[in-house]
Amino acid sequence: MIHFKNISKSFGKNLVLQNVDLQINTPGIFALLGPNGSGKTTLIKTFMGMVCANSGEILFNQQVVSGNEYRKKISYLPQIARFPENLTPLEFFDFIEKLRGPAPRKEELIHWFNIEAFLHKTLRNLSGGTRQKINLVSCLMYNNPVLILDEPSTGLDPVAMLKLKKWILAESQQGKQIILCSHLMDFVQELADEVIFMLDGEVHYRGNQHQLLAQTNTQTLEEAIANLLSEPKAQLVC
Amino acid sequence: MGAMGRTMIRYLVIIIIVVGGSVTANARELVVGLSSAVTSLSSALKMAKPYDTLCVNAGTYHPDSTLIITKPLYIFGNGNAQIEAAQNQGIFEIRSDSVTIAGFTLQNVPKNYLKDLAAIWVDYSQHFYIGNNTINNCFFGIFITKSKNGIVENNTVKGQAIHEHSSANAIHLWYCQKMVVKNNWVRHHRDGIYLEFVDSSNIENNISEQNLRYGLHFMFSNYDAYQQNTFSNNGAGVAVMFSKFIQMHRNNFNANWGDAAYGLLLKEIYDGEITGNTFQKNTVGIFAEGANRIHLRQNDFIANGWALKIRGSAMNNEFCYNNFIGNSFDLATDARTDYNSYHHNYWEEYSGYDLNKDGLGDVPHRPVKLFAYLVSKLDESILLMRSSFIELLNFAEKVAPSVTPTSLMDKTPLMKMYRPA
Amino acid sequence: MLKVFKYSFLDLMRNRWTIAYALFFALCSAGLLYLSGDGNKVIVSAMNIVLLLVPLVSVIYGQMYLYQVREYVELLLAQPISRKAIFMGYYLGISTALSLSLLVGFMLPALLLQPSYLLNTNWLLLIVIAVVLTFIFTGLACWLVLKYDNRLKGFGAGLFIWLLLAVLYDGAILVILLLLEDYPLEKLALVLSMLNPIDMGRMLLIFQLDYSALMGYTGAVFSHFFGTRLGGFILTFGFGVWLSFPIVLLLSKARKKDF
């Protein structure tokens, strides 16, 4: 129940979003795809209130987004895992919990991603993959109806990757809305129900993954995207 | 008014009686008292013959007019003899040689803009003695004109001066010679001790404080010595002007604060010696203008705003073996070239070293800071005191002097505080 | 806001630089207390250190910490708390941590070496001024971090502001006073120095210490001014403005900024 209404945003002269109009009404996994600089992250950030749009408005559950309370229902995973470096993961989770309230699934996720051994080391000394796992735990430990995951698979080993996929699918099955930004096409292909393809600050294509594959007559999402990039826009929008 | 004072009076009385007795064989003693045969001071003065002794018993006396003494007399207050001034009158007026007035409490001589009313006025007299009196709330305390060889000692003079123009001095000497002013305590007057045209006199061991203007003020007075006096909390400190051959030793100049307040103001002073004095917490320790050939030695300058302010007109003075400790500015001058000599002083701010261990710094000390110069040019810049920028400027100036006189330096600064052996 | 404050504060208190900062002031004040007996001298020397270093460290350290926070700020912004709460929380966290270091650095040596200083009004006033300056310059640091994404520019601007207020400003006042020498300048001089928090702190202390030099005519005028209720009010007001000014800048920048 997210509705972007004619969102435009520019950074200086650089027009990043142009009249983006997008509705996500049904549960499911939505892959937000597009080349670098196409506006995916900016679009998400306007929704999270991190970027102020120049024009347009965003509705969440039929209400114009304002204030901070609506974020209680959203779990957001930032693209790059950055933490207060002097804290240990446990203190960091504690930090998040203090800000947002007790997290019901913390222990479960710590176990799920198998990071018990790192809980008492300072974040500064942890490897990229471990940091991403901690990032994931801090995001997923809340049982929220909306999940926004920006590049969740960065730096993960195959085992963790598998676990992440399982978790996302399980969440989806509970009827949640999951928005997924990723460059790993096979990862997206396995999960996504719908594909939203952005190009130059506009929604270039939106549709069911199977339809897209069928329409472009391709086997993989990667090929489909490559195909999309070479096709004129008008033909593709359903 | 200790036992010593009293003994001295006794000796004096004996001497005077012996000397006087040889002149007039039959000196009498008259007792004046409220319950005695003679009740009034003025009639006693009339009855008395020269060299008689008037013994005034305890009590409060209200003479109708000023008590004028025209013959040599010894007048003593016996116990608490208190004399109140008559309306618009002074109390004693001495117009004869060899008069002694001692042991009285003299009170409430009113202010007068036309006449110099005083508790004791001495005029054209010699060999007088004024001692052990307490003078309260009088316009002038002790006022001495055209006199010689007198002694003023152990008196306490306390005024209630509020405005300079409507108040007068505690001890005032004019055209006098060979006077001794000693052990007096004067306060709350316009000037504590005032001397004009007074030569060859000795001002010693007095305390002069909380006076509106100067603790000690003298002009045109030569060959005088000022020793062991304390001048503190006076409106403008001590002013010494137009005088020659002055000796000032071991005095204390304390806490003379305010605009144009000086521990010691030297103006047109020649050939004096200023030794062993202490200048503490004054706005300006010594301000010298037109002071020449003065030797300033072994003085302590402690926690003053400016320890020394020297005008270009002050020349050929010697500053040596002085201690400069904790002053905001040790030395300020408006001169580009300074003609005084500074050597063997202790400057607390000196940052040099002494490699050969002879007790003298190996690098000359420049006591004039750039900021001191700036403040002397521009009062308001005092607001920038202790600012980092100013410290930077001072440092730069110290390294490469451009504004302060290059020749002004102490080439032999002491490494340790000077203490006389 | 309290939550963010609490976390940043604890985080900073464990930081070795915060501890080094406290240690530095402890050594300074211990040295001063030990070497010179005279009360005013200790305070003046400590004041020179405070007026120069506290703003510098507040700006640089505040910026260093916030540029680091700036990296994970997205994580905070995604939480259901306001931007205001986040940045005010950090601002207060840094200021309080630095202030606490100052407090320890000044109080501990005094307690051990000369306990009478714990009740010395001038010593306490110096600490209060140091704390106020910490808050002001940390506020400026927070604002600069939001204003400049480029760290080099941010640190450059921070250093410049410090240099301007701590050193150059007084030079400018001096030049202005010298240029306008022929006019009555007391009020102008006073107003100009009141525009700079470092100068305000310095004057407040200097006029508390009994500097005889300040009792010359102009000095007396100034001294009188600082003694009156009006002077006290204006000083409080000046510090108030300086305390709130960076916060206003910070909050308005935080409200509009894209992360």
Image (cartoon, coloured by chain):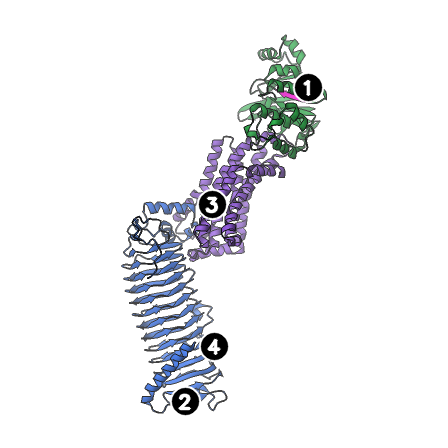
State whether discs 2 and 1 lie on one chain: no
| Disc 4 packing (10 Å; few <14; some 14–19; many ≥20) | many
Q: Which residue is mark 3?
A: C27
What colour do you see for chain B?
A: blue
Q: Are marks 4 and 3 in contact (CB under 8 Å)?
A: no
Q: Which residue is mark 1?
A: A169
| Disc 1 packing (10 Å; few <14; some 14–19; many ≥20) | some
User: Magenta stretch: residue C68 in it?
Assistant: no
In this picture, residue A179 sits left or right of residue B3: right
User: Magenta stretch: residue A178 in it?
Assistant: yes
Which region of the structure is painted magenta? A177-181
Total count of labels: 4
Q: Which residue is mark 4?
A: B108
* Residue A4 x/y as whole percent: 65, 24
- Residue B29: image tag: 2
Residue shown at 43% from the left, 69% from the top: B165
Q: Which chain is purple?
A: C
Taking the image as drawn, is residue B53 in sight?
yes
Q: Are marks 4 and 2 in contact (CB under 8 Å)?
A: no
Residue closer to the observer: B106 or C41: C41
Task: Name the mark nearer the viewer: 3 or 1.
Answer: 3
3D distance between C-alphas at marks 4 and 3: 62 Å
Identity of the amino acid at label 2?
Glu
What colour do you see for chain A?
A: green
Give the secondary structure at mark 3.
helix
